Each structure stands twice: as structure tokens, then as C-alpha cells.
Image (spheres, rainbow, N blue to C red):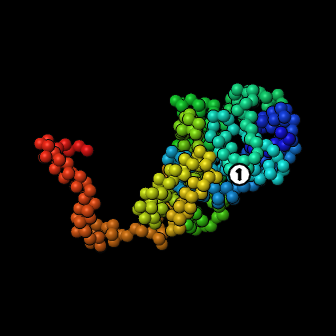
Amino acid sequence: MKKIAVAYSGGLDTSVMVKWLKNKYDCEIITVTGNLGQVGELEGLEEKAKATGASKVYNVDLREEFIKEYAYSALKAGALYEGKYALATAIGRPLLAKLLVDVALKEGCDTIAHGCTGKGNDQVRFELSIAALAPHLDVIAPLRTWEFKSREEEITFAIENNIPVTVTRDRPYSIDGNLWGIATECGILEEETLAAPEDAFQITKNPIDAVDLPQVIEIEFESGIPKSINGVEYDPVELVEYLNIVGSKHGIGRLDQIENRLVGIKSREIYEAPAATVLHQAHYELEKLVIDRETFRYKQNISNKIANMIYDGQWITPLFKSLMAFVNETQVNVTGSVKLQLYKGNVWVTSRSSRYSLYSKELATYTIEDTFNHKDSEGFIKIYSLPYRTLAMKKMELANALGRTISTGT
């Protein structure tokens, strides 16, 4: 092992890891950080990395690529893990893995190291992506093998080696954030019977304390992609940043979830995703307006599959690519606007419009303007129920032949 590219966030685990790797292997360490819009940890990153043993530091702004190619892909897919989680952390991992591989190949590294634990999902997300992109590179995960048995021991190591970290023994949260959302775990959050304390939330107001006036916003989409808010066009990063600010003030996007991890255990996570929550709801409502019934129903199954694949680290796979081709085809007519009202942690859709709308007031109305031919329903129902009528008649026929009483059950 001559040169290691380290996935470096500047948090507790990776800060300790750089020093630990330098001590253990006495090799060249290059840290690699992708800026996905995380708050706080990027400050003083280069100085800290070099002070703990790195010879070179990469800090690359990936925010636009992250939103355009990753977050918006998940949005178009309607990917919400277990029906709720917007997958902010999971969406970012394949992009960070790609950056790691690019730097490792450029710098002639023979090894990549990451700071994921042995019972988390991220180890799989990183290592599967690296294997798909550069199978010849070795991957090591110090947190699976080193001597530290707890975050408290890591904090002690950091203090003893003058490694500056923001985590304390009194607030030992593990926080991962980007523009699409923030995930918080550890500490008191591991007690599933206790309410999450307010200091576990990083950006959102408690809905109880949120502003008392509702706010209406209108989001314009083009082929499944949000383009403007209230008539003002934004680039992808600015649009998500704006919705995070607005949503946070109204307490939008908080989620306290027990979820099924890939390794088989259940974990408790605190998520905050104001922009993702608003955009997913608006996008879903617009899809219902413009996508035909059978495609919409089938896409619900695909959305769930894609969400599971993203969570399980399978972004860079042939099946994922194929499913996204289907998703992109469904988005051709997902163009239009959706109005939403934000208030005290809730998002209500108040109106939606599109030139591709399949809604017809004349067909839906119960007024004199009704153009639906009600007589057609009789023949439709007879044909629709024909298989079940045939089945019931056959049961009756057999029962009569055997002298039995037919059951109304199935």
C-alpha cells in the first residue's frame, strides 16, 4: 500500500481516520471531498486534513452535478425509500465514489479508504460503486477493523492528537448532509422510545414554532424538472437552496423514521429535507394530471424498485440504467405548474395545470355540462366482470352436479 485516496468529510470518523491511516501504514494520504452542499464541515477542511497527515487535498464543488444528474433523477423516478425518505445520503454516494475513483486514478493511488461503519449502508454504496468503476483498486474500511469500539473512544483519540472536531461526548450525533437533505443518528436517537430532542434537527423549525402565516408558492416543471418558482427561473442549485430556506421556516420536511438497513438491522434516523419534500409532492401531483392510468400505476412499482436500488447502492448497474430509461420516457409530458401551500410542517397542493393535462371537466362534472355517456358503463361492466361471472357460473355448475351447496367465499 503506497498511496491512499481517502473519502474525507471532515467529520469525526474521517478526521480520526486520516491520522490513524498515516500512523498504521506510513504511506501517502490524499483526501477527497465532494461539496454536495453540506453545511459547516467544509470550513477549514484543507488545513485540518493536512494537519492530520494528508499530503494533498481535493475539495471539488459537485453541487450542480449532484442536483441535475442525481437528485433530479430520483425526483423524476419518485424515489422515496419505504414511502418517505428522500434518499439524500444514498443519492450522493455514487457521485462521491465516482470522484474518489477519478482522483485515485489521476494520482496513481492503489487504494481507496472510506469512513463507513460495518453495519451501515454507505459501505455497500461506496464499495459497489467503486467495484463497478475501478475493480482493480483495493478498498479498506478502517472503522470495520480499528481498535475504537465507540464514538467516545474516537473523540478521546481526536483530543489526544489535537484533531479539531465539532462532535462532543454530550452531543455525539453522526450527521450527514447535502442540498437534498440531512440525516442525523446516534446518541439519544438510538433510544427509539424517546422523542428526538430539538438539537437533533439542524435546519428546520419545529412546526409548532414555525411562522403563523401560510405561504403559497407555484413551481413550474419542464419534462419532470423544476425550472421556476413564482415565475422566477432558478438554476438547479439555487432552486433547491431557495426551497430549503422557505421550507425550513415552515417546519417542512422533518422525518423521524425506523427503517430497514441493507445489512438487516433496523435503525432510527432523523431526516430533514424541506426542498425534496416540496418537490416530490408537487411532481407527484403533476404526474397524476398528465400520465395515463396504466403508465402511472406501473411507474409506482418502478418508483419503489428504484428507491430500493438507490438505498442499496445499486446506482451504477445495468438494471438501474434501464429503469431510468423508462422513467425518462414517462417524463416527456410532465410539464406544467403546481401551486402549494406551506404551513406548520404541512404541504397542501391547491392547484395544478398543464398543456398536457388529461383531465376533462366535461367528462368529470356532474352538472348539465356532463358529456360522459352513462349508458356505456353497463356494457363496460358486463365485459369487465365477465371472467368473474364465468368463474362463479362454473362453481355453481360443479356444485349442482355434486349435490353440494355453493360457498360464497373464494
Q: Residue furthest front?
A: 401
Q: Residue 269 falls in which quadrant of the image?
A: top right
Q: Position of residue 396 (x, y in %)?
A: 16, 49
- Residue 116 located left or right of residue 275: right
Q: Is residue 349 visible?
A: no
Q: Is residue 92 visible?
A: yes
**Residue name at image x 54 percent, y 38 percent:** 260
Q: Position of residue 246 (x, y in %)?
A: 59, 54
**Residue name at image x 73 percent, y 27 percent:** 148
**Rendered view: 356 above or below 118:** below
Q: Position of residue 17 (x, y in %)?
A: 78, 36
Kind of residue indicated by mark 1: Leu
Q: Residue 362 falls in which quadrant of the image?
A: bottom left
Task: Depth check: give the residue in front, 196 or 303.
Answer: 303
Which quarter of the rendering shows the N terminus? Answer: top right
Residue carrying label 1: 133
- Residue 210 located left or right of residue 380: right
Q: Residues within 10 Å of mark 1 (few under 14, many from 20)?
A: some
Which quarter of the rendering shows the C terminus? Answer: top left
**Residue name at image x 50 percent, y 50 percent:** 304
